[in-house]
Image: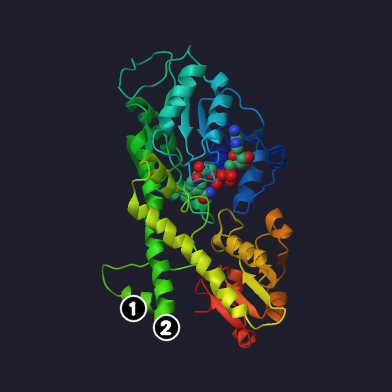
Amino acid sequence: MGLGYIGLPTASLLATKGFDVLGVDVNTKTVDRINLGEIHIVEPGLDILVRSAVQSGQLTASLEPATADIYIIAVPTPLSADNRPELSYVEAATRAVAPFLTASSLVILESTSPIGTTEKIGRWLAELRPDLAAPSNEDSNPPGRNRFFLAHCPERVLPGRILEELVQNDRVVGGIDAESTARAHDFYRSFVAGEIVKTDARTAEMAKLTENAFRDVNIALANELSMLCERFGIDVWRLIDIANHHPRVQILKPGPGVGGHCIPIDPWFIIDSAGGDAPLLKAARGVNQTKTSRVVEDVQSKVEGLTDPVIACLGLSYKNDVDDLRESPSVEIALQLAASQAGTILAVEPNIVELPAKLDASGVKLVDLETAIAHADIIVALVKHREFLDVNHGALASKVVIDTCGLLR
Ligand SMILES: NC(=O)c1ccc[n+]([C@@H]2O[C@H](COP(=O)([O-])OP(=O)(O)OC[C@H]3O[C@@H](n4cnc5c(N)ncnc54)[C@H](O)[C@@H]3O)[C@@H](O)[C@H]2O)c1
């Protein structure tokens, strides 16, 4: 259920491992493209895998689910405008599979989810299918009953390395009951080379959220250092290099903020589940968001005194060498610069062919690197894409350069 960055690589990998896979998505264009053996996202190696999975007949895409032994839910779990987890996609996917469940069906939630979501799915399914016994975490499930199984197995892959990490990463599987955990474990064992750690559903949910909260807090330190170093006139990259010579210090890299579908969102799931009582996680979110605003302010201060300034934003995606613009601080920076009429805003993003509607409507222009460098007064390096690594430093000599990602180091 869901053929995006997680669902499509998973579906095609399983298909090439011999499973009969029905990939379900609510987006007609996505379904049509996949059935042609084509892909709608950028991920190394995915085009070949999907083509071969579709051509072999092991993978078919559809708008509707069907009866299956295993249902994997990999739909979005975004945040609402007031930083609350949005579970409507998970609920819709659950409702869509409910009529097809049979005795012994295994339902796996892969979407990153707030604590208690797997139990919620169990309650929804129990309501929708009173003819089947729902698993209970009280271990009162007599074996062999007309029941289904339910587990959470959060996904931890890194975009850009998804196909490799789907197989190599360690996984955590947490069932609603021991039998659900065991069945989910056996399923992942059939294609995962990494260790598969068994736990309960709530711990599995919290484990995934903890991993991304860990990243957010640590990036917040790097971003706070970058803002402090600006004030102190210290090169933050050199500072971090030096501090990391300490045998037990490993400071991460600063950037223009924190983006993507996971790290800036998942800490809010914990904060929400805790009723707001998670002060360190809230502070880290605040620091990382402040860093994005600081980059905008920095550019705005450099624009002062220039006539018809041209500002080039190098990179829009949330990290290097991917096309994923979700929650990207670079997009936010380009939008804020455009909204404040700081000048003509050029964006260079080699991984997309057109700007998303809101950037396009804001007047930002998508150009290639040479055009940007030729015309810009101010260059804002936002993402360290491989296409930017050989940028001609000489051509930048006459420009104001704001390097948020260490591109020029
Ligand atoms: N992208 C990542 O790197 C990553 C990594 C780890 C975990 N996750 C988590 O995995 C989940 C999925 O993320 P993604 O990046 O694959 O999202 P995505 O937006 O790329 O894909 C989700 C897909 O689900 C489809 N969809 C929405 N509602 C549906 C429904 N009711 N039935 C069937 N399909 C439906 C959408 O059309 C879309 O194609 C999220 O919870 C995310 O946090 C993502």
Question: Alpha-carbon neighbours of circle 1 within 10 Å: few (<14), some, or many (≥20)?
Answer: few
Q: Are marks 2 and 1 in contact (CB under 8 Å)?
A: no
Left or right side of 285 for 203: left
Q: Secondary structure at mark 2?
A: loop
- Which residue position is annotated with label 2? 233
Asked if 13 appears above or below 148 in the picture, the reply is below
Q: Is residue 389 visible?
A: no
Residue type at numbered disc 1: Ile
**Residue placed under numbered mark 1 in the picture:** 242
Q: Residue at x 56, y 69 (%)?
A: 296
- Quadrant assignment, res 301: bottom right
Residue extending furthest toward the left:
247
Query: Would you call the spot at circle 2 few (<14 residues within 10 Å), some (14-19), or many (20 or more)?
Result: few
Q: Residue at x 32, y 36 (%)?
A: 199
Task: Determine the CA span between mark 2 and mark 1.
Answer: 16 Å
Q: Earlier in the sequence, mark 2 or mark 1?
A: 2
Q: Which mark is residue 90?
A: none
Across and down, in percent, residue 33 comes to 71, 42
**Mark 2 Cβ and ligand 1 under 8 Å apart:** no
- Quarter, ligand 1: top right
